[in-house]
Image: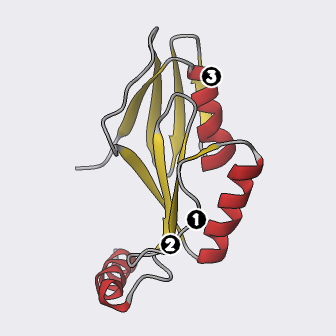
């Protein structure tokens, strides 16, 4: 089975789609008042228009991983300078440094790196990296 797409509701399709393009490296395939279709890393992202505010379940979020603490810090500074709504500052966590931010419409993102994860967590990350490299 192959991962195909993610689909999200938004009361502002254009602003939400722009967030994905400007900050997350997605390409915009099509956009209308009703929906936007984006691509990223072999899968589609669909943003569908809603005429009401979207309420997300507590702590529902998407996670993106960067390869180093420096890259994570650069992204944090970029998003902060662009006026993106930050839910947290950049902080160190035992599973790796991270921060949380929100796209227009309130969709929550966790941006993280495993580069500085505690040793007891690294073994599983390194096994996964090895398995991915063998594929």
- Image quadrant for the C terminus? bottom left
Q: Is 131 or 16 nearer to us in this picture?
A: 16
Residue corresponding to mark 2: 97
Q: Is there a contact, CB below 8 Å, between mark 1 and mark 2? A: yes
Disc 3 and disc 1 in contact, CB within 8 angstroms: no
Q: Secondary structure at mark 3?
A: helix
The x, y position of residue 84, in whole percent, is 66, 42
- Please indicate whether residue 20 sits to the left or right of residue 5 in the image: right
Tally the marks.
Answer: 3
Label 2 CA crowd tier, 10 Å (few <14, some 14–19, many 20+): many
Instruction: Pick the residue in front: 128 or 12.
Output: 12
Q: Are marks 2 and 3 in contact (CB under 8 Å)?
A: no
Q: CA distance from mark 1 to mark 2?
A: 7 Å
Residue at 65 percent of width and 47 percent of height: 23
Asked whether, in this view, residue 81 is left or right of residue 38, the answer is: right
Name the residue at 39% across, 86% down.
118
Q: CA distance from mark 3 to mark 1?
A: 27 Å
| Lower position in the chain sequence, tag 1 or tag 2 | 1
SS under mark 1:
loop
What residue is shown with label 3?
14
Q: Does label 2 or label 3 sit earlier along the sequence?
A: 3
- Position of residue 111 measured from the top left corner of the image (x, y, whole percent): 51, 59
Q: Position of residue 60 (x, y in %)?
A: 34, 43
Can you say whether 61 is above or below 103 in the image? below
Q: Residue lying farthest right? A: 81
Q: What residue sits right under mark 1 in the picture? A: 90
């Amino acid at each position: 089975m192959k991962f195909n797409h993610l689909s999200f509701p938004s009361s502002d399709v254009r602003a939400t789609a722009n967030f994905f393009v400007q900050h997350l490296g997605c390409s915009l395939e099509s956009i209308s008042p009703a929906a936007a279709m984006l691509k990223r890393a072999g899968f589609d992202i669909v943003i569908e228009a809603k005429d009401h505010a979207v309420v997300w379940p507590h702590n529902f979020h998407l996670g993106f991983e960067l390869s180093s603490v420096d890259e994570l810090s650069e992204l944090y500074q970029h998003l902060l300078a662009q006026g993106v709504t930050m839910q947290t500052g950049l902080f160190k966590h035992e599973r790796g440094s991270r921060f949380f931010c929100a796209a227009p419409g309130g969709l929550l993102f966790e941006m993280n790196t495993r580069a500085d994860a505690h040793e007891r967590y690294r073994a599983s990350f390194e096994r996964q990296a090895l398995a991915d490299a063998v594929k």
